[in-house]
Image: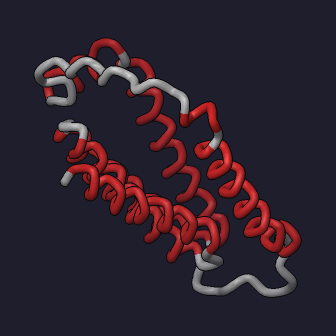
């Protein structure tokens, strides 16, 4: 059952990532990013990392995406881009090159190198509580405290920058 859920979530994650990249409307792109972040949370649940899944939904799909949508709404107030698309040649090349990449991956997976490979022993089981609150809390507040705090300062600076740009644009 977990394998079926994994493949369904993986397909939705890839589809939402593609839609994120291919949509011209930035709000639609942000919504597809929320779907993608939700898929990552489900993958965390499949790995028995409940706290990380909850943090993924609350922090990224919630707070960070509200910040992104706020910035999009302030910087692009309801008007669509006009004029020719400057990325049109790149967009025309993206689909054929993506198809070639998928074909290469399929050929590699069907090659004799992968067919002759011996099955690998399953990885050792994770220790109890590997994705739990205690482990993640220890990592965030002891081992990785400095990068965690730097990230919060960068997010605050981004919010202040958006407000400064909005004030300058309005005034």
The quadrant in which the N terminus is found is bottom left
Q: Position of residue 45 (x, y in %)?
A: 21, 45
Relative to residue 90, is residue 113 drawn left or right?
left
Relative to residue 58, is residue 96 drawn left or right?
right
Among the 4 quarters of the image, the one containing residue 114: top right
Relative to residue 101, is residue 142 drawn left or right?
left
> Is residue 165 at all visible to an observer of this figure?
yes
Q: What residue is rendered at 63% in x and 36% in y?
A: 112
Q: What residue is rendered at 54% in x and 47% in y?
A: 158
> Compared with residue 51, is residue 135 higher up or lower down, i.e. above or below?
above
The quadrant in which the C terminus is found is bottom right
Q: Position of residue 124 (x, y in %)?
A: 25, 18
Q: How many labels sit on residues?
A: 0
Q: Position of residue 15 (x, y in %)?
A: 49, 67
> How are the colours assigned in the image?
secondary structure
Q: Residue furthest top?
A: 143
Among the 4 quarters of the image, the one containing residue 47: top left
Relative to residue 113, is residue 131 drawn left or right?
left
> Compared with residue 74, is residue 135 higher up or lower down, i.e. above or below?
above
Q: What residue is rendered at 88% in x and 71% in y?
A: 89
Of 95 and 154, the residue lying toward us:
95
Q: What residue is rendered at 32% in x and 58% in y?
A: 38
> Is residue 137 at all visible to an observer of this figure?
no
């Amino acid at each position: 059952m977990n394998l079926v859920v994994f493949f369904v979530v993986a397909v939705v994650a890839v589809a939402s990532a593609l839609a994120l990249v291919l949509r011209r409307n930035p709000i639609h792109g942000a919504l597809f990013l929320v779907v993608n972040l939700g898929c990552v949370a489900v993958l965390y649940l499949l790995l028995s990392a409940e706290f990380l899944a909850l943090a993924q939904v609350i922090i990224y799909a919630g707070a960070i995406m509200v910040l992104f949508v706020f910035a999009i709404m302030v910087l692009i107030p309801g008007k669509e881009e006009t004029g020719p698309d400057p990325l049109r040649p790149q967009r025309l090349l993206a689909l054929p090159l993506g198809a070639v990449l998928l074909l290469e991956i399929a050929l590699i997976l069907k090659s004799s190198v992968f067919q002759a490979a011996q099955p690998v022993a399953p990885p050792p089981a994770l220790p109890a509580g590997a994705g739990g609150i205690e482990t993640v809390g220890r990592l965030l507040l002891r081992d990785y405290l400095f990068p965690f705090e730097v990230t919060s300062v960068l997010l605050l600076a981004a919010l202040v920058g958006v407000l400064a740009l909005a004030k300058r644009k309005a005034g």
